[in-house]
Image (tube, grey):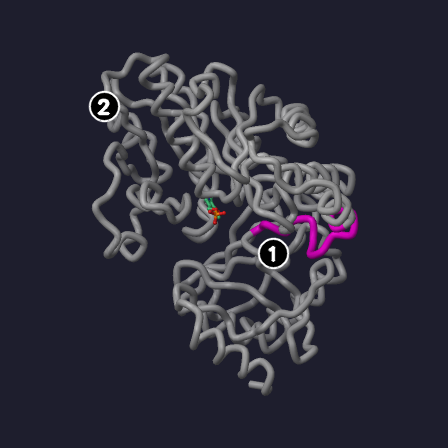
């Protein structure tokens, strides 16, 4: 490793907590789909910060908003109103069709907020007996890292050493409608799911599963809660992944690309009936709905729509996936995905291939040992995809 990279890796290893195992590339700056390390080497970013930078790194319009707003007012707390929050809520409503918005910061906080909303709705509206509410979730889920959220993870490592856990969750296999039906009881207040499981390795459920799940939730008066923190905002070639199935969730959780990678902004969207269960003092966040985050998110959403990034994701993602599927490789088991969200499942461990791709100038990250996730910013061009394909073919090909 070059000196500056090695020095910084050593420094981080010495003073930082080792709760990640990053590739040893130390990034200093970025522009669009390209990132540059401290030794000046250029890489194509095929992770896009887990889809938080769908709009591309350091998008000039979002940067302008960040700088302008930072010079005006950054934080009021919700003790007072600010001029950006109402516009953020209105624009998110106009874009998504959901009546109410509850802004938070990280994705995990938004999931926690959705869990609280579903439980309270269960007691106040559905009439579930006190402390009996149940939420059904899917095996292989990823919804964040707080204690309550890992309480319903099926991943041993996420839970090991962190108990005792929050009760009230039932895990069913993803994509199995019978298992979902059997898990329902009169105390079920919600079904929480990712329309496509990202961290599990871009796992797409069987066609019709989500439609049947939606129908079953409706029949049983339970909330359909979609976590689209990673799958949403254009990643899969639709504004939200649930749109591929022609369903509409009762609760939609968004984050990551909501602020284009400039700022942590998340939100829970739902009807007035659901979010109406919150009254002043029931829930809150010092930074949630702050004017800087709201201003940045407003521009990030506008960029997504005005630059037609959702359409680009569908078109160029389809091209990228088809070319990968045509790749002649002894290690590729399957290439799957939707839009610009592609999983390459290998017959071998993915990490060494990610290391090799890094040497070729492509940054991607293995997920669940055997899958390489390809998820570049949605502004990627066909030429850049071709550039990547050449190198991916060299690493994975015969
Ligand atoms: C990233 C992610 C989260 C957690 O978001 P954080 O901002 O890291 O807390 C939750 N759900 C899904 C589907 C995610 O991809």
Is residue 348 toward the left or the right of residue 103 in the image?
A: left
Which quadrant: the N terminus? Answer: bottom right
SS for callout 1: helix
Residue 378 x %, y %: 68, 50
Residue at image point 57% right, 56% down: 49
The image's mark for residue 374 is none
* Element marked by disc 2: loop
Q: Earlier in the sequence, mark 1 or mark 2?
A: 1
Query: Whole-percent x and y of residue 107?
Result: 49, 43
Residue 56: say if magenta: yes
Q: Identify which residue, 101 or 350, lies in the foreground.
A: 101
Q: Distance between the residues labelled 1 and 2?
A: 40 Å
Which residue is labeled 1 in the image?
A: 48
Q: At 45% from the left edge and 67% from the top edge, which residue is drawn? A: 350
Magenta highlight range = 51-63
* Residue 132 percent coordinates (x, y): 23, 23
Residue in front for this viewpoint, 195 or 110: 110
47 and 38: which one is in front? 38
Asked if residue 136 lies left or right of residue 344, the reply is left
Depicted 243 relative to depicted 351: above or below: above
In the rendered view, tell whether residue 181 sits above or below residue 380: above
Crowd around label 2: few <14 · some 14–19 · many ≥20 (10 Å): some
Residue position marked by numbered label 2 in the rendering? 132
């Amino acid at each position: 490793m070059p000196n500056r990279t090695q020095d910084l890796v050593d420094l981080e290893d010495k003073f930082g907590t080792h709760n990640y195992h990053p590739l040893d590339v130390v990034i200093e700056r970025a522009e669009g789909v390209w990132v540059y390390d401290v030794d000046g080497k250029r890489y194509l970013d095929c992770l896009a910060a887990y889809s938080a930078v769908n709009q591309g790194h350091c998008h000039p319009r979002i940067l302008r908003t960040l700088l302008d707003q930072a010079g005006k007012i950054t934080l009021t707390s919700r003790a007072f109103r600010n001029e950006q929050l109402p516009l953020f809520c209105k624009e998110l409503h106009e874009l998504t069709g959901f009546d109410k918005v509850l802004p938070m910061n990280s994705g995990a906080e938004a999931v926690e907020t959705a869990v609280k909303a579903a439980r309270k709705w269960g007691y106040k509206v559905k009439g579930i007996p006190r402390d009996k509410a149940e939420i059904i979730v899917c095996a292989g889920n990823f919804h964040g890292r707080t204690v309550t959220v890992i309480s319903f993870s099926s991943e041993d490592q996420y839970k090991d050493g962190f108990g005792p856990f929050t009760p009230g969750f039932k895990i069913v296999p993803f994509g199995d409608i019978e298992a979902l039906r059997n898990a329902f009881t009169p105390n079920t207040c919600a079904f929480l799911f990712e329309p496509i499981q990202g961290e599990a390795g871009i796992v797409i459920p069987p066609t019709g599963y989500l439609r049947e799940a939606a129908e079953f939730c409706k029949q049983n008066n339970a909330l359909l809660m979609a976590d689209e923190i990673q799958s949403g905002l254009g990643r899969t070639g639709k504004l939200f992944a649930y749109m591929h199935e022609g369903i509409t969730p009762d609760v939609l959780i968004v984050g990551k690309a909501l602020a284009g990678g400039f700022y942590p902004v998340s939100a829970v969207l739902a009807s007035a009936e659901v979010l109406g269960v919150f009254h002043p003092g029931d829930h809150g966040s010092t930074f949630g709905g702050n004017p800087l985050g709201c201003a940045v998110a407003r521009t990030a959403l506008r960029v997504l729509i005005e630059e037609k990034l959702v359409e680009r994701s569908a078109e160029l993602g389809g091209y990228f996936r088809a070319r990968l599927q045509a790749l002649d490789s002894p290690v590729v088991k399957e290439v799957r995905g939707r839009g610009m969200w592609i999983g390459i499942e290998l017959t071998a461990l993915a990490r060494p291939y990610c290391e090799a791709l890094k040497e070729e100038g492509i940054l991607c990250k293995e997920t669940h040992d055997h899958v390489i996730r390809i998820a570049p910013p949605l502004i990627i061009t066909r030429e850049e995809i071709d550039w990547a394909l050449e190198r991916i073919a060299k690493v994975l090909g015969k």
